[in-house]
Image (tube, rainbow, N blue to C red):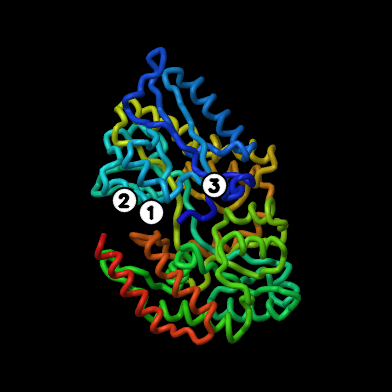
Amino acid sequence: MRSTGFRRTCTALVASALTLTAVSACGSDDDNAAGGKTRITVNCMPPKSAKVDRSFFEADIKAFEKQNPDIDVVAHDAFPCQDPKTFDAKLAGGQMEDVFYTYFTDARHVVDINQAADLTPYVKDLKSYDTIQQQLRDIYTVDGKVYGIPRTGYSMGLIYNRKLFEKAGLDPDKPPATWEELRAAAKKIAGLGDGTVGYADYSAQNQGGWHFTAEMYSHGGNVVSEDGKKATVDTPEGKAVLQNLKDMRWSDNSMGSKQLLVINDVQQLMGSGKLGMYLSAPDNIPILVKEKGGNYKDLALAPMPGGKGTLIGGDGYMFNKKDTPAQIKAGLKWLDHMFLTPGDGFLGDYARAKKNDAPVGLPEPRLFTGAADAKDQEAKKANANVPVENYQAFLDGNQSLEMKIEPPQAQQIYSVLDGAVSAVLTKKDADVDKLLKDASGKIDSILARG
């Protein structure tokens, strides 16, 4: 599942009323533009409403075409970059772009339905490929073949309000490291009154299931077995997740009375200064400031409580199975230029971002390794315009956590787990054991269908 959507600057998360722009059929039939150029269609161009991002994207394409006069890039804008409701239909109908955006959880599915081009013979020409984190490259590698290129990655952590910590007598430089400490801190923050909520969590639109999964990982558990065939939620770790939420909601009264929250609800609470903590990736922070009224100096980031693991996600690009070799080579060149050059391009030109008042210095995404990572981090540090010290705990703590990707059939599983999470947050007499048993059976059925 995406963290917030289009991952770039403060203009990224506009209103969700914007819908996926319809596009014309794409594929290898149109690979030759006028004058013998290789033509590629690409998606995930920022919408016109995201003016700064849009201008960056267009300028970068223009620069790429100037450097590569034999390639013509036709970009399609959309928000969100991928609409789950239309994604499969576009694939099946031959409407997908030549180079198209995907979440990490899409990779195997796209390969399984035979809609992805095999990039294995071509990645040797992608100069940045070997610098990308291996665990991210592995996500797009199926049966030893490369079918996609990672663009960004994120890991979940704990966003908290330093001002509320201080007001509640808590040390903002020592965020909770365990769920017991988080529960105690949430109770103190809620005790401030005046509508203040200590801890908030999602419980609708599949987002509750997404966070349940992240919380399971933090306890050292999983939602499905390693072979992907059986549910593993009806376990001590699963019970710990639901029981903790139930106790915080009903025994501690630290989660507020309003439930069935989704990401926008929680962001509004945090931005208004009425929320102490919630689980999130770093890219939420600029949204809280630019759109929800928050302040960078008040917002800090810690690793997932529990110390065992965290959920990772992200996105990348795959290639249409109808692409010609020329289109694949052109598309890889475009990805290198736009997203995979440390300190440069749409995601990495930190000097340009800073000049346009976009946040620089957030701890993620961190895509590269070795010298490429060092170069990227050096450029980020030189142009930082946010309080990077507020995120040091997250950077330090993540070093010891196991990074786990989302489960197979993630959205269907999240829908099931939504029911369990929402039940403990809305029903005082919710039976945790029964909820987990029921969820386990439903997830087993989902996995059995493949």
Closer to the camera in the image, 418 or 328: 418
Check the image and report above or below for 365 versus 197.
Answer: above
- Measuring from the top left, give residue 211's x and y in whole percent: 48, 66
Contact (Cβ within 8 Å) of mark 3 with mark 1: no
Q: Locate residue 31: give its quadrant.
A: top left
Secondary structure under tag 2 reads: helix
* Rendered residue at 56%/30% (across/down): 58
Asked if residue 269 lies left or right of residue 446, the reply is right
Q: Tell me the residue that label 1 is attached to.
A: 105
* Rendered residue at 72%/65% (across/down): 273
Asked if residue 434 lies left or right of residue 421, the reply is left
Q: Tell me the residue that label 3 is attached to.
A: 7
Asked if residue 146 lies left or right of residue 236, the reply is left
Check the image and report above or below for 199 versus 268.
Answer: below
- Measuring from the top left, give residue 63's x and y in whole percent: 54, 25
Q: Amino acid at mark 3?
A: Arg
- The answer to whether residue 368 is seen in the rendering is no
Q: Which mark is residue 90?
A: none
* Rendered residue at 49%/67% (across/down): 208
